[in-house]
Image: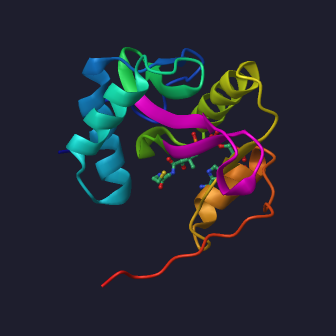
Amino acid sequence: MSGASSITATEPYRDVQIRPAVAPDVARVAAIDEAATGEAKPRYWQSLFENFSQARAGCRAFLIAELKGEVVGFICGEVRDFEFGAESCGWVFALTVDPAIRVNSIGTQLFEEICQIFTQAGVRKVRTMIEHDNQLVMAFFRSQGLMVGRFIGMEKNLD
Ligand SMILES: CC(C)(COP(=O)(O)OP(=O)(O)OC[C@H]1O[C@@H](n2cnc3c(N)ncnc32)[C@H](O)[C@@H]1OP(=O)(O)O)[C@@H](O)C(=O)NCCC(=O)NCCS
């Protein structure tokens, strides 16, 4: 599956539309994700779409950036209540923009839109998790005003 779009980096990006995902978007989301991560997970994206399309509308968001009728990015997140002993907050757990047209504010537009949804849902904080050596994603979220939070991730291999 290829993540490459037919849109070139020389085109203007003023016409990007941010909207909720619909079923035909899922294959393209999976392709952009596969291009970014090197791992194909079509069933994961289909299942995520089904869980996030209508259920708990207002607390869950699966948003698409569309340019000239083509999916060029997506963001997923939800409001979670009191997890890890924290206050209710919005979590962003997936965000990817087509590599062909990055650094054109598409990630910013996606993030701003999901933050509006979180605000309307009544929460006052947004959180995410990033790999500590992923400087690109770190730079992006820093540019959006996120700071290192008061939680750290912990993990263990279950062999
Ligand atoms: C992170 C990502 C979503 C950013 O999308 P984008 O549309 O390129 O971001 P924007 O154009 O809105 O950039 C906003 C700011 O982020 C920072 N930024 C973005 N790309 C950057 C880069 N390559 N280097 C340094 N800073 C960068 C800059 O501060 C930028 O502001 P500026 O253009 O005024 O300098 C995109 O790079 C991406 O999809 N990366 C892969 C993510 C991934 O691995 N996803 C899978 C796991 S969820």
Residue 130 showing in the rendered view: yes
| Above or below for 114 versus 58 | below
**Quarter of the figure that contains the N terminus:** top left
| Residue in front for this viewpoint, 45 or 25 | 45
Question: At 58% from the left edge and 32% from the top edge, which residue is drawn?
Answer: 106
Magenta segment, which residues?
Answer: 72-95
User: Which of the 4 image quadrants contains residue 72?
Assistant: top left
Locate residue 79 relative to residue 94 in the image: left or right: right
| Above or below for 13 versus 158 | above
| Residue in front for this viewpoint, 65 or 15 | 65
Residue 5 showing in the rendered view: no
156 in magenta: no
Q: Position of residue 85 (x, y in %)?
A: 73, 55
Give the prevailing secondary structure in the magenta stretch: strand
| Residue in front for this viewpoint, 117 or 36 | 117
85 in magenta: yes
Question: At 23% from the left edge and 52% from the top edge, which residue is drawn?
Answer: 40
